[in-house]
Image (tube, rainbow, N blue to C red):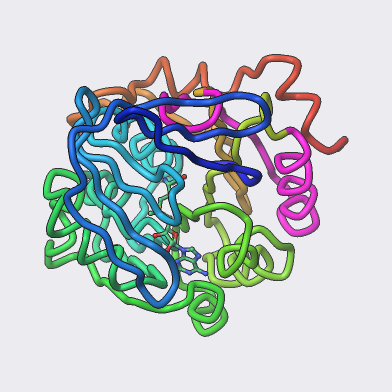
Amino acid sequence: MSVDITHDFYNGWYLERSRGWALGLALENKLFEKQSAYQKITVYQTQTFGKLLLLDDIIMVTERDEFVYHEMMAHVPLNVHPNPERVLVIGGGDGGTIREIVKHPAVKEAVLVEIDIDVINTARDYFPSIASELSNPKVKVLAEDGVAYIRNNQNYFDVIMIDSSDPIGFAEGLFQADFYQDVYNALKPDGIMTNQTDSPLLSPMIVEKTYCEMQKVFQHLFMYQGYCLTYPGGYWTFGFASKRYHPLNDFDPKRAQAKGLKTKHYNSHLHKGAFYLPNFALATLPAT
Ligand code: SAM
């Protein structure tokens, strides 16, 4: 997602517009709509991308391409950390990141803290292939504000993933240094945080600001890339912020392969390649 987004419906198409660029999805019909305590939740059946989840009319996931984003957010840190037993996801109420996390044999506890219970319920009802592991006994689902939750959990998690919506409204706090400091404190001494950090192509100012905030807290900070056809511009980035581990030097492809993870996108070559960035993306990173 990206801020400054507007939307439109045109002859059966959903159009998401951002900075002079637009993405269109051909719709079949609306399946669900509800104004929750936090946002408008809408589910459409599209013609070619499966079901589509919109929050306040902004694209969150489609069934067809969600796996790229969720696999990149989860498997990169979980294959760098040597023993990720306790994992936290903030946001991510669709369940896609959790589905990937529980594939890792070392994981004993995966906590999902999503502010909006209606997002979780909608995912369970309409996106069973994404929410499939929310009832896994290793998974604890909490409908709470992640900003408040993180303050009460110090030195506990091996990996924390911030699977958030745009830095506006109630999600804004998830992009600020105070929050990153609380994440830092909630991580064990060798913990790793990953987060979605928008598009350096369409939203370089947002990306720059996010990394500046992270740099105030984390000594080891990296950007890695992926793509998501249904996010603005398609080209997407993630942050890898760590207390100790390096995302390439501490990545052992043999150890990763031994887990036998079933993934549609992620593999060891992509893991490494994701950290080699184009110059326009590098230009959004703060000087070290
Ligand atoms: N992968 C998606 C993307 O980039 O479009 C994000 C999807 S996920 C559905 C984002 C979730 O973050 C939303 O369901 C939203 O309710 C949740 N969220 C936003 N602010 C939050 C907060 N302060 N605490 C917990 N969850 C939050």
Which stretch is magenta?
204-233
Q: Determine the image quadrant of residue 183.
A: bottom right
Q: For this view, does 154 lie left or right of residue 203?
A: left
Above-or-below relation of 208 to 48: below
- Based on the picture, tell me whether residue 232 belongs to the magenta stretch: yes
Q: Nearer the viewer, residue 36 or 285?
A: 36
Residue in view at x 13 percent, y 43 percent: 129
Above-or-below relation of 189 to 279: below
- Please, which residue is most extreme toward the right here? 287
Q: Nearer the viewer, residue 149 or 288?
A: 149
Residue in view at x 80 percent, y 48 percent: 212
- Please, which residue is most extreme toward the bottom here? 152
- Based on the picture, tell me whether residue 198 belongs to the magenta stretch: no
Above-or-below relation of 186 to 280: below
Q: For this view, does 272 lie left or right of residue 175?
A: left
Q: Determine the image quadrant of residue 258.
A: top left
- Image coordinates of residue 128 in percent, x first then y, are 12, 49
Answer whether residue 96 is visible to the viewer in this image: yes
